[in-house]
Amino acid sequence: MPTPTQEDYLKAIWTLIQTKGYARVSDIADRLGIRHASVSRMVRRLHAEGLTTYEPYRGLNLTPAGRRRGRALVERQRVLRAWLVALGLGPGPELDRTVEGIEHHFGPQALRGVERLVAYIGHHEAWWRQFRDAAGGEGTGPDAPAPETEREGELDPPRSQGTEAELP
């Protein structure tokens, strides 16, 4: 199981390969904002763990296991970002910091639950708007306005007809 730091490198490598077709130590260092020497050390570790192939001065690529893990890490970040946006956290540096701060603490089971919730919200947007309005609107922080009233049963989720995503 990769460490959070290794996961950050795998995400960066996977993303660079997807966008540029390759990943070099200098590209990874620029993307992560760290020194080239630190990247070189980590690339050797990832290579030793069978996640990358690396030739000094020529660049690196992901092994099939590295590609699967990189893709899963990018997907985890996408799901968490969608969840936080649904909760009212808008795009920008705060969203990025929050995702970076929590992503390494979500295991597969928790992530599947969040993914199902995000899908449910997508299929029940009117219910979700009603929930957010009753819960205080867009904001979720300490400055968010308190709901004016809380009526029992007001936020019952819609009953599914079996055609939309359902939470178990």
Image (spheres, rainbow, N blue to C red):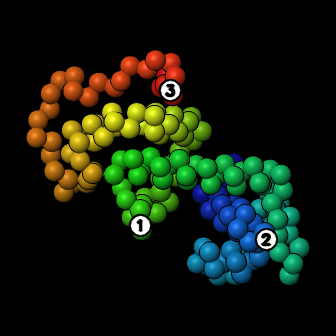
Nearest-to-viewer mark from 2 and 3: 3
What percent of the width, then of the height, locates residue 142? 21, 54
Q: Give residue 143's position: percent from left, percent from top.
A: 18, 57
In 3D space, how far apart are the residues under numbered discs 3 and 1 (Cα atoms)? 31 Å
Q: Residues within 10 Å of mark 1 (few under 14, many from 20)?
A: few
| SS for callout 1 | loop
Marks 1/2: CA–CA distance: 27 Å
* Res. 92 mark: 1
Q: Residue at x 15, y 46 (%)?
A: 146
Percent from the top left, x then y, of residue 111? Answer: 54, 40
Can you see residue 158? yes
Camera-side residue of 134 and 3: 134
Badge 3 local density, few (<14 within 10 Å), some, or many (20+)? few
Residue positioned 50% across, 26% down in the render: 164
151 or 76: nearer the viewer: 151
Q: Is residue 103 left or right of residue 94?
A: right
Of callouts 3 and 1, which one flags the residue occurring earlier in the amino acid sequence?
Answer: 1
Q: Which mark is residue 22?
A: 2
Q: Residue type at mark 2? A: Tyr
> Which residue, given by chain and number where applicable, does mark 3 sit on?
164
Q: Nearer the viewer, residue 165 or 71?
A: 165
Q: Residue 43 location in percent, x, y?
A: 76, 69
Secondary structure under badge 2?
loop
Front label number (3 vs 1): 3
Neighbor class of circle 2 (other Cα within 10 Å; few <14, some 14-19, many 20+) is some
Location of residue 116 with respect to 161 vertically, above or below: below
